[in-house]
Image (cartoon, rainbow, N blue to C red):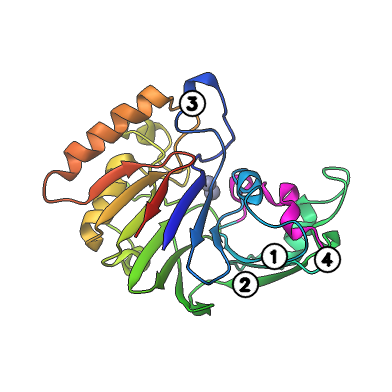
Amino acid sequence: MEVTFYGVRGSCPCPSEANRRYGGNTACVALTLAGQDPIIFDLGTGLRAFGDTQPVDGTFAGTALITHIHWDHVQGLPFFPPADRVGARFDIFGPQQDAGSLADLFDGFMRPPYFPVTCSELRGDIQFHEVLKDDLTVGTAKVAVRPVPHCGATVGYRVTWGGRTVTYVSDHQAPLDLDTVADSVLELADGADLLIHDAQYTRSEFEQKAHWGHCTVDYAVTVARKAGVRKLVLFHHDPSHSDERLDELLIEARAFAGVSGPEVIAAYEGLQIVI
Ligand SMILES: [Zn+2]
Ligand SMILES: [Zn+2]
């Protein structure tokens, strides 16, 4: 299983000279499984670069697993030509919303005058699937879906294929004690080979934004340790964190993990991990 990071930021795209190494696109991570169609975690602005790797002759087929429908997780879809071709097929899984069906909600943000065409006018066959607490099969991969604390309906995913497991928890509201972990998240991450996890804030930032739906870098390490994860990828970086700041946060996270904790790396655009 190969994991490729196309967008690693939270909240808002932030390309700049100061963010050159880690990148400024929002959440999008692709899984390549031998002999299978790709699986994509979230459709943030990183999706555009993923699209450059995919066919635009109508043969594209893939599955998106989206955690929720905040802008930073869906804004790439209008800029994904592989799905805008007759014959293409795109299955999009995401959490049930009180405000309406996923298909209607996507058409709500992707339509004139915001964008020239609606989602339903894309020429590919785009199918939405609403999930919350489900166990799915995608190709020959097993996919577990569980709720994750955040702002509004949000889920995380656990994908197991070929005896390897990758867990994706992009946006995670930490409790004020920065220690307890929801059972649903522990279930998703239990013994995973790789955990991709929210790492938006420092402790002092969390004190100012404790109810904004995210967690600290240390809390990501705590989740990984409690779940017995082998490798943790810090993800959903705050747009205000420059390359130098992220380097510092990674060093601090590794110190917090200690020798007995998980291996810790920080996601950057272009990072590829084979597990
Ligand atoms: Zn987000
Ligand atoms: Zn969010």
Query: Which secondary structure, mark 4?
Result: loop
Residue that label 4 marks: 86
Residue that label 1 marks: 102
Q: Position of residue 118 (x, y in %)?
A: 84, 55
Residue that label 3 marks: 19
Magenta extent: 69-86
Q: How many marks?
A: 4
167 left or right of 109 in image: left
The amino acid sitting under disc 4 is Val
Identity of the residue furthest to the left in this view:
259
Report which quarter residue 148 is drawn in.
bottom left
Tell me: residue 100, above or below residue 74.
below
Question: Who comes first in sequence, dot 2 or dot 4?
Answer: 4
For the point 54% across and 47% down, the residue is 27
Select label 1 or label 3 by which is in front.
3
Does residue 143 show up? Answer: yes
